[in-house]
Image (spheres, rainbow, N blue to C red):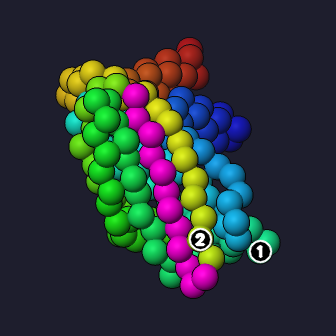
Amino acid sequence: MRRARLVPAVVLFAFASVAAADGGRLRAYGEAGEFRIAIFTRPEPLSAGPADVSILVQESESGEAVLDADVTLELSGPGGVTTQLPAARHARNRLFYGAAVDLAPGAWTVTARIRRGTADAESRASFEVGTSRIRAAEPWPYLAVPPLAVALFAANRGLRRRERKRRKH
């Protein structure tokens, strides 16, 4: 009975490193004014092309998520390129504010500006964006699951067959 529980736990643990959280990789976290601000980027590792920058804003005293703030992102990239974007609430996780951006390779800085009533705050994170990589390599963990399931099924059948033969003799 213990083995039956152990196998799924081991499989889930093995694939935990490829699981993506809602926000992505935490780039900065800290208190600014009346807020706690966390800045996330996704995908990991960041490579040239489309990316997601997400912001989690919380009240610093209570830790409750702030859902009614005006959040603006300012991205400064290689070559002095600066872009300002309004951050909208995410459809996937409504606690996050975020924007889809197109990143070029090089060093980037994102500044999140939060305004809620009379309270203003700002948080900054820096990160490096690598050259474009082949995105076709990303689904390999998912493609490995069916053959793994078939192999486990075949091993189970083989062990059961061996057990039956041993009981007959």
Q: Position of residue 84 (x, y in %)?
A: 33, 57
Q: Residue at x 71, y 58 (%)?
A: 31
Q: Give whichever of 163, 84 is nearer the camera.
A: 84
Numbered badge on residue 62: 1
**Residue 38 pos. (x, y %):** 59, 54
> What number is the disc on residue 120?
2
Q: Is-magenta flag for residue 109?
A: yes
Which segment did they paint magenta? 107-118
* Residue 25 vs residue 148, the one in the foreground: 25
**Around disc 1, counting alpha carbons within 10 Å, would you say few (fewer than 14), some (14 to 19), or many (20 or more)?**
few
Under tag 1, what secondary structure?
loop
Magenta region includes residue 131: no
In terms of sequence position, does the residue under pointer 1 or pointer 2 come before the other? 1
Q: Residue at x 68, y 60 (%)?
A: 32
Residue furthest to the front: 80
Check disc 1 and give the amino acid type: Ser
The residue at the point 53 percent across, 74 percent down is 115
Q: Is residue 143 visible?
A: no
